[in-house]
Image: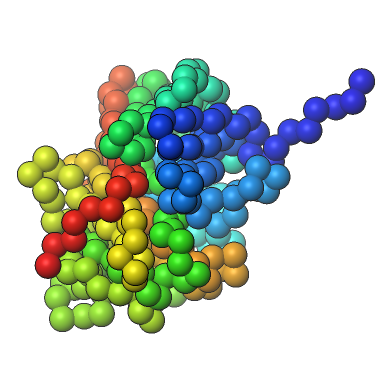
């Protein structure tokens, strides 16, 4: 009997709502594609590819980097595998290549689950769940982590979608981003200081083209709307349909990345990464979540396919 070909990203779960189409995957529980009205909103990847450059992946139980992969927690030192070998960092958590279980799949909704068991460098137990839901308002992604172990554990959450408005590069894309403070990093991607964006080429609080600006920065002190959401907005230079990515109040940081050093990205799209904490939070403790046994943390972000008004 001939073997069934298995996609590198595992089981594919397709969601539909009106003219919106989403595919989420078993490997990493990530988001592979998202389109609306026949246009791609996500710079994703094919079903015969292994996910490149973190596209659409969930970053759990920490986003971004941990310097040297080492940290101290409740008086004990832990050493994580160095998954960014060239820079000697542990990067983007422990679940990106794990198999997630599809616990619910409907026409416009899917729920995937994964249990992160104790392991070298992270001797804690987390039950993880992500819900993807389509509606008239777009895509909503809700991530919940529950400490199912006997000890308190450190936790942070992130995601890594690359957004596109259909332009060949992001240079002419008009961007509005809500961060009033930017984190500068060293050559290893570890934060060195935090400074106001005002008066710098990293100030996108008023909409303007990205132009030649190279973005690989975390932003915080996010301007929020009355409902608590912070929103990043993109539109093409011809005033065609744009899109926005929003985060709830659990996400205090947004990483913006034009992908200049990555051949498969190279400014073709813009990564807008919701993060509950900054890079290296396991060492600095900045905005790091402490989950006691039995406690849970939930955060929600989403992408809206409509062309939204830009603030002057």
- Residue nearest the observer in this picture, 37 or 143: 37
Does any portion of residue 82 appear in the rendered image? no
Q: In this view, does 32 lie to the left or right of 177?
A: right
The quadrant the N terminus occupies is top right
Residue 2 pos. (x, y %): 90, 25
User: In the figure, 36 relative to 238: above or below?
Assistant: above
Does any portion of residue 260 appear in the rendered image? yes
Residue 23 pos. (x, y %): 53, 36
- Residue nearest the observer in this picture, 71 or 243: 243
- Residue at the image position 42 percent from the left and 26 percent from the top: 108
Q: In this view, does 170 lie to the left or right of 55?
A: left
Q: How is the image coloured?
A: rainbow
User: In the figure, 62 relative to 143: above or below?
Assistant: below
- Residue nearest the observer in this picture, 96 or 69: 96
- Residue at the image position 30 percent from the left and 41 percent from the top: 301
- Residue at the image position 50 percent from the left and 55 percent from the top: 43
Which residue, as the protein is rendered here, is positioned at the far right? 1
Q: Is residue 81 left or right of residue 198?
A: right
Residue 239, quarter of picture: bottom left
- Residue at the image position 22 percent from the left and 41 percent from the top: 248
Residue 294 pos. (x, y %): 31, 19
Residue 33 pos. (x, y %): 51, 44
User: In the figure, 120 relative to 271: above or below?
Assistant: above
């Amino acid at each position: 009997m001939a073997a069934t070909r298995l996609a590198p990203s595992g089981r594919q779960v397709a969601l539909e709502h009106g003219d919106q189409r989403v595919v989420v995957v078993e490997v990493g529980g990530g988001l592979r594609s998202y389109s609306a009205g026949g246009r791609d909103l996500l710079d994703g990847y094919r079903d015969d590819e292994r996910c490149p450059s973190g596209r659409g992946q969930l970053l759990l139980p920490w986003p971004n980097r941990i310097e040297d992969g080492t940290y101290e927690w409740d008086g004990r030192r832990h050493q994580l595998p160095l998954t960014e070998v060239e820079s000697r960092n542990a990067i983007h958590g422990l679940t990106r290549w794990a198999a997630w279980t599809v616990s619910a799949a409907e026409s416009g909704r899917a729920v995937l689950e994964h249990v992160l068991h104790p392991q070298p460098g992270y001797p804690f137990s987390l039950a993880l769940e992500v819900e993807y839901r389509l509606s008239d308002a777009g895509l909503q992604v809700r991530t919940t982590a529950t400490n199912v172990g006997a000890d308190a554990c450190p936790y942070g959450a992130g995601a890594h979608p690359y957004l596109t408005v259909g332009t060949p590069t992001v240079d002419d894309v008009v961007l509005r981003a809500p961060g009033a403070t930017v984190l500068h990093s060293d050559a290893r991607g570890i934060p060195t200081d935090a400074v106001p964006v005002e008066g710098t080429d990293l100030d996108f609080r008023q909409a303007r083209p990205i132009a030649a600006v190279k973005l690989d920065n975390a932003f915080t002190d996010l301007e929020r709307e009355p409902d608590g959401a912070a929103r990043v907005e993109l539109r093409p230079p011809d005033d065609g349909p744009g899109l926005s990515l929003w985060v709830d109040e659990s996400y205090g940081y947004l990483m913006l990345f034009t992908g200049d050093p990555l051949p498969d990205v190279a400014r073709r799209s813009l990564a807008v990464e919701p993060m509950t904490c900054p890079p290296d939070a396991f060492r600095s403790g900045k905005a790091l979540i402490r989950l006691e046994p039995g406690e849970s943390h939930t955060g929600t972000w989403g992408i809206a396919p409509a062309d939204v008004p830009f603030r002057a």
